[in-house]
Amino acid sequence: MIYHTQLNPTISFLHEPGYRRYSLALDISEVFKPILVDRTIFRVLNKKEIQEKHFDKKLNGCHLNEMGKKIYMRAWEERLSETIKHRSLNKNVSYKHLVKLECYKLAKYILRDEPEYKPFKIWW
């Protein structure tokens, strides 16, 4: 969603830029991790969509295998397309669009169109 705005993905404010890593995406993701990533993980685990058989345990680590990745990515896409009633816009927006709105809000603050940046805060 960053590419749909005026923001430069290589310039960040929380994470240090790294080689071949766009750290602004990491900064913006911090706002949405609890409501998007964490809840998606808990959903696939609690509904037993992802089980032990969906993991590869190699080299003292544990990674999702191909089937596990497909299951998680399907759940992720479903989560991004879910809608919520936006308080200030007074209409339904998808989580994907909500991320884009957050990018616009950050750009407005940087361009001094807004006096203060208030990150998205869950209200339910």
Image (cartoon, helix red, strand yellow):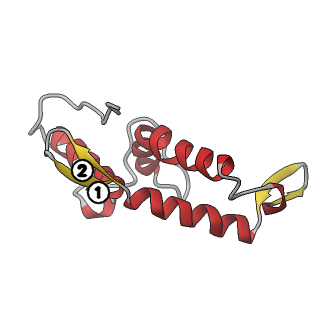
From the image, tell me which residue sits under label 1.
97
Secondary structure category for the residue under label 2: helix
The local crowd at label 1, few if under 14, some if 14 to 19, many if 20 or more residues have their Cα within 10 Å, is some
Between 104 and 52, the residue placed more toward the observer is 52
Quadrant of res 12: top left
Determine the CA span between mark 2 and mark 1. Answer: 6 Å
- Specify the amino acid type for callout 2: Leu
- Position of 99 compared to 69: left or right? left
Nearer to me, 3 or 84 = 84
Which image quarter is the N terminus in?
bottom left
Q: Residue at x 59, y 49 (%)?
A: 43
For label 2, the residue is 101
Q: How many marks?
A: 2
Which quarter of the rendering shows the C terminus? Answer: top left
* Circle 1 SS class: helix
Q: Position of residue 47 (x, y in %)?
A: 65, 51
Q: Is residue 77 above or below residue 99?
A: below
Q: Position of residue 112 (x, y in %)?
A: 11, 37
Residue drawn at (25%, 30%) of the image = 118
Label placed on residue 119: none
Establish if 61 lies above or below 30.
Answer: below
Asked if disc 2 and disc 1 are in contact, CB closer than 8 Å, the reply is: yes
Task: Say which of 118 and 20 sits in front.
Answer: 118
User: What amino acid does circle 1 point to?
Assistant: His
Is residue 55 toward the left or the right of residue 110 in the image?
right
Residue 49, percent from left and from top:
68, 58
Neighbour tally class for label 2: few under 14, some 14-19, many 20 plus, Cα within 10 Å: some
At horizontal 21% and vertical 43% (from top left) the residue drawn is 105
